[in-house]
Image (cartoon, coloured by chain):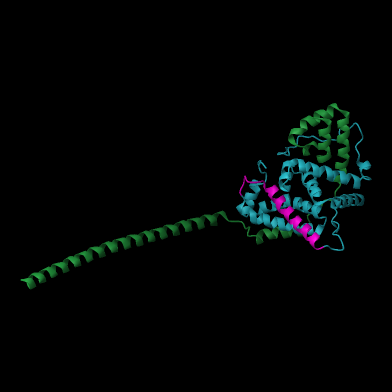
Chain colours: A green, B cyan
Amino acid sequence: MTIERLTQLAQAYGADLRRWPDDARVDARALAAADPAARRILDEAAALDAVLDASARAEARPALRDRVLASAIEAGLRPRARRAFGLDRIAWTLGAGWAAAACAGIVAGVGLTSHVTADDRADAILYQSTLTGVDDIEVLG
Amino acid sequence: MGVTADPDEDLVRRVGQGDPAAIQALVARKLPRVLNLAHRMLGDAVEAEDVAQDAMLRAWRQAPRWTPGKAKFDTWLHRVALNLCYDRLRRRREIPTDAPPERPDESPGPDRGLLAVETGERVNAALRLLPDRQREAIVLCHYQELTNIEAAGLMEISVEALESLLSRGRRALRQTLSDMAPQTRVPDGRASYRDAGRARGGGR
């Protein structure tokens, strides 16, 4: 790392190397250990860091905290009881099972009915054709 | 932006299941963070509270359908809060007011002396004077301690552009607060920079 690059980084991120890019920290530490000019640059940046650290912090007032907690309930976040959830799931599964069975019964019933109806209709047509045949013989002599 | 392990993943999952303890823990972990982000971006305690409350409400709505692995929850929450801040900054520009919003934080902690409060307010006032993007860069990197990659990703700029904004912002702050610097200046010859092994992760 050059002294120019160290200066750039100190001017941007300050003297706290934890704020620096990962890949620059080791080189910066080595340069600061070896070069008094690098240490001076970091000291100047540290002075500004200290001033910035004096910035007034906003404290979260209890009233704000309470409003935020209340908003969690308003947003629909409610604890789900594990047991109730399990029962719901079982009830849903049983309901779905009964519904599936009913559907299967209806499908089978319709299929069977249409099969029976078709057989009956075929028999009736055959019977009628027989009768017609007899009549024709009788008429035609 | 590469997604590393999300330290909030388990907490957010439990919040999504309505776990009251997790909801309280997320408030304790994120509300001060979002509040300070908004406070430094907007320079107004009341508006900062509104933004923080709105951002947390969106977090509650998001938690049940949060998909781990896509982004870190903290980064997503910063995105939400920043958007809310920029909405308010835009509105200020569209509807100029006579009095700039400089309502000070009226809740100093008991351990903070008057001088410390005054000093803190001066720094915040200097931050308010910065152009929005310079202030955003400094707030994200210095105060919110996001990595350079996370901050650049949130701001949708390159890391080089982020460094440029940071440098210009810090230079302006040094000039504005030049009378404060000598009091906190570290004597020459002492290693004032910190390089403890705290893992911030994800930096370039």
In the rendered view, tell whether residue A109 sits above or below residue B19.
below
Q: Residue furthest front?
A: A140
Residue A65 x %, y %: 74, 57
Residue B51 x %, y %: 75, 57
Residue B127 x %, y %: 85, 50
Q: Residue furthest bottom?
A: A139
Question: Along the horizontal axis of the image, is B18 left or right of A96?
Answer: right
Q: Residue furthest top?
A: A34
Question: Along the horizontal axis of the image, is A136 left or right of B67?
Answer: left
The foreground one among B89 and B106 is B89
The foreground one among A83 and B193 is B193
| Magenta residues, dominant SS class | helix
User: Quarter-wise, where is residue A84 in the image?
Assistant: bottom right
In the rendered view, tell whether residue A76 sits above or below residue B152.
below
Q: Does the magenta segment cover residue B89? A: yes
Q: Which residues are magenta?
A: B67-95
Figure disc tally: 0
